[in-house]
Amino acid sequence: MTGYDDNGFVAVDSSIDLSNCDREPIHILGRVQSFGALLAVSADWIINHASQNIDDFIGMKAEDLVGCPAGDHLDAKAVHDIRSKFQLLSSADAVERLLNVDLLGDGKRFDLMLHVAGRSIVIEIERHDVDAKTDYISFIRPMIDRMSACHSVDELSDLAARQIRALCEFDRVMIYRFERDESGTVVAESAAPGVDSFLGLRYPASDIPKQARALYRRNLLRMISDVHDEGAAIFPPRSPEGVPLDLSLSATRSVSRIHIEYLKNMGVNASMSISILRRGELWGLFACHHYSPRVLPVALRGALELFGQLFSYVLDQKLSDAEAVHRLKAQRLHDHLMTQLAEGARIADSFDQITDAIGQVIPYDGVAAWVDGEFLAKGQTPSREELLSLVRFLNTTSPSQVYSTDCIGAQWPVASHYAERAAGLLSLPVSRTPRDFIVLFRKELAQTVTWAGNPEKPVEWGPNGARLSPRESFEEWKQITRGCSAPWSDGEIRAAESLRLTLLEVVLRMTDIVMKERDRAQQQQELLISELNHRVRNILNLVRGLIGQTSGKTTSVEAFIETVGGRIHALSRAHDQITRKQWDPASIKALLRAEVEAYVGVDTDRLQLQGPDVLLHPNAFTAIALVFHELTTNAVKYGSLTDQHGKVVVEIHEGEDGSLAIDWREVGGPPISEPPVSKGFGSVVIERSIPHELKGDVALRFTPTGLNVHILIPPPHIAAFRYEAPDTRAPKPVQQRPRTADTGSFALPSVLLVEDNMIIAIDSEDLLKKVGAETVYAVSNVKAAMRVLDNENVDFALLDVNLGLETSEPVAERLVAAGIPFCFATGYGDSNSLAARFPDAPVLQKPFDHSTLTVVLETILSRH
C-alpha cells in the first residue's frame, strides 16, 4: 500500500522504489506557487475556487470571493476581454494568454492565463512587469532560421540549448532525451561559467514518473520559481461534489514535495522545462536550472513555449530525413534481392547472397537461418542445437513482425551461456507456419553507462519507516553492463521489417507457385459453373417474360410465334456478337446491320449509318439490341421498310460529356396521318428499356414522313467511339427471368418491387397484380426504393438481390426495421448467406411463377 506522510512524501509498508512516484497525484495538489494567484469560475461566471494568496493580488480574500459573480469584483471591461479570449480556446488542452490587463479598473496591470479544467474556467493571475520586453516573439524567427541550417540532430540540439539560455538567462539549459527504457540522457547543454556540466549523464526513468511525463505532453512549459516557496492553498480544496480542482494545465501549479527535495539535493533553486514532442509522443525536454529564485514573465514564457514547438518540428524533420535514408537503403535492398533471386528460388540456395545484401544495410556479427528444417549459419552465431532452442523462444514472440533485443539472456536465460558470441539478436520470420527465421546476431559489447548518481538507491529509512526520498548525490556513477550487444536502432528495425516482407514475398513466390495454379484452376471452374447457372436462369426468365408480355398482344398463334421468335432471334444475334470475342464491348453499327439485314437482305442502301461507330459494354448491349429489334420490326411492318423505296437513317453523335446520342429517322415510307392510339409491348420496350436499365432517355416523335426516335445513353455504358475502322466486338446480354399461371389472390393494397431489369420488372409487376396487388411501385435501385418507403405505405416487397453495382440489402434492412414482410428473388446461388442475414425472408429462385409466389405469400402473410 502507498500513502502520504505529514510531509507529503510517499510512505510505504513493503519493498518499494521510486516507481511508486508514478502514483502521486501531482495534478491535484491543491496549491499554487506564490508568483501567481488563481481564480476558477463556473460556466455562468460564478467564482467557485480561489487561491488563498488572491488577497495579495487584488485585495480581496478567497473566502469573500467564492460563490459571488466574477463581475461583482472584477472590472467589466476586463471580464469582457476574458470572456472574448475564452472563446479562442480551441481544444481541451489549449491555454490562452491575456497581457497587461487592468483587472480591477484601478490602473494595476496583470498578465492572465486561461484554460478549462473540468467544468471550471481557470484564470491564473500574475503581476505585469512594466519594465519587461513584450515582443519576445520577434526573437523566435531568427532563432528558428539558424536551427534550420543545422545538418545533424547533435548540431541542432547544441544550438537550441544555447539559444534558450540566451533568451531565458537560466544558469544551465539541457536537452534531455528519453531512451527506450524511459531513462533520460543529457544530449546537449549550455551552462554559465563555473556551473558543473551534466552533459552525457543518464538519469533513471524514476526521476520523471509516468504521470509527470503525461503532463509534459499536455502542458508544454512548466516553471518552478523557488524551491523554498510554500505556495498558497486553494479554497475550497474540493468542489461540492468532493472533487479537487484539476491543475494539469496550470502554470502556477504547486510542486510535489518529492520533486522539491530532488531539486534541493541538486542545489537548484528554480527550474523550467519545455516539452519536446515528436508526433504526439514525448521525445525529450529542455531542462533549465537556476541557482537562485527566478520568475519569467508570461510573455517570455509564451515565446519559449512557441520556440519549443518549432524546435520539435525542425527536430522531426531532421529525424525523418535520417529515417528516409534508411528506407531508401531498405528499398534498394528489396529491389536488389527481387531482381537477383530467380523465380521459385529457395532461400537456402541463396543464403549467402541474401545475407551479404543485408549486411550492407544492417551491420551484424553473425547470421543464422532455420528454413524448411535446415540450419544455415555464417559468422559468430549459436550452434545448431542452441539455435533450435532459441527458435522455440522466437516462436513465442508476436507473429508476422520482427523481434529485437540487445540482451538475449535477459529474455531467454539459456542464451547467457553464449553471450560472448551472440548477445543481441534481430529475428525476421520468413514463413507462416511452422515458423522459419533468419536471425542476425551481435556479439557482447561491454558498455559503460554514466549515471547521475546511483540509480539503484532510491529508498531512505527514517524514524517513521520507509519513505521514497530522492538520491542526494548526482556525481557521476559509472556502471559497466555485460551480456548485451550494441542496440539495434529504430532505422535498422524498420529496415528489417521491410526486408522481412521482401523475404516473405520470395518464400511465398517459391512455395505457393504450384498451389496458385491449382487454386486458379479450381476457382475458374467454380466461377464458370456459377456463371453458367446464373446465365441459364436469367435466359429462361427473359424468354418467359417475352412470352408472357407477347401473349396478350397478338391475335393468332402464327402472329404470336412470329413475334416471339423475332424477339428471341434478336437476342440470339446480340448474344452471338457478345460471345464472338469473349464478352468484349460490341459495335452498334454491326448490330444495326445484322438486325436490318435479317429483314431486307444485304441491300445496305436501305440502312444509312452516319457518324462514328460505338462500342457498348455488355451490360448495355442486350437492352439496345431489343430496342433496335422493335424499331426494325415496326419499320418493316408499318414504316419505311414496308416497300422497296423507303429507308432508315441512323445518326450517331458523341456528347461533350462522353454520352451517346442516336437519332433513328424513317424516310420514304407510307405517310403518317396521326400517331397510333394504342401501344403494344414493342412500344413499351422502346420507351422504357433504355431509361429503366441504362438510366438513359428515349423520345418518340411521329412525323408525316415517318417515325423519329432520339436515344441518349449515359457515358458509363460506352467503351469507345471509333471514327475509323469500326470494331465489331461484342458484350454480355442483359438477362431476364420467368413466370407461370394463376392460382389465387391476396389482399395487397401496396407492393414495392425492386428489380433492375426492365422486362423482368414488367413481368413481375403483372404477376404481383394477378395475386392481388392493387398498386405496385416498381423501382430499379436502392435510392428509389428508399424514396417509396419514405412516402408510401407498403404492405409487401419483392426484392431482386443484385441490382447492378449495388444490392438490395439496405432496403431489406429498412423493411426489417419497419416490420414489413418481404422476400428476395435471385438467379444466383446465394440463398444460404441471405438466410443467415435475413432468416424471416424467403428466397425465390429465378425463374419463379405464379404458384411459387403464391406459396411464398401464404407463408409470409400467415406470420404477419
Image: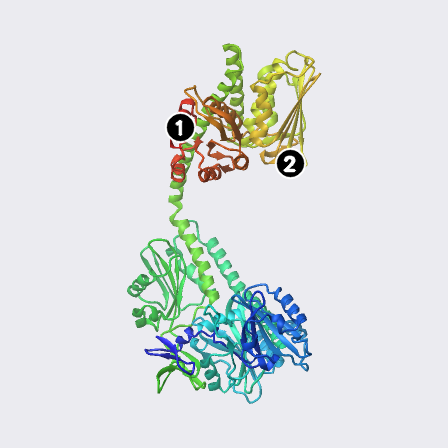
Using a 10 Å C-alpha cutoff, classify the residue at mark 2 as few (fewer than 14 neighbours), some (14 to 19) or many (20 or more): some
Q: Which residue is mark 1?
A: 856
* Chain-order first, disc 1 or disc 2: 2
Give the vertical position of 241 relative to 682 (above or below).
Answer: below
Instruction: Quadrant for residue 829, please give it.
Output: top left
- What amino acid is at disc 1? Val
Asked whether the viewer can see residue 819, the reply is yes
Q: Residue 583, labelled with which disc? A: none
Mark 1 crowdedness (10 Å alpha carbons): few <14, some 14-19, many ≥20: some
For the point 44% across and 38% down, the residue is 816
Percent x, y of residue 609: 66, 24
Residue in the foreground of this view, choosing between 364 and 151: 151
Question: x%, y% of residue 111?
Answer: 63, 76
Closer to the camera in the image, 779 or 519? 779
Q: Which residue is mark 2?
A: 658
Which corner quadrant holds the C terminus? Answer: top left
Instruction: Answer left or right for 649 relative to 744.
Output: right
In this rendered view, identify the residue nearer to me: 200 or 683.
683
Question: Relative to the observer, which residue lies in front, 531 or 406?
Answer: 531
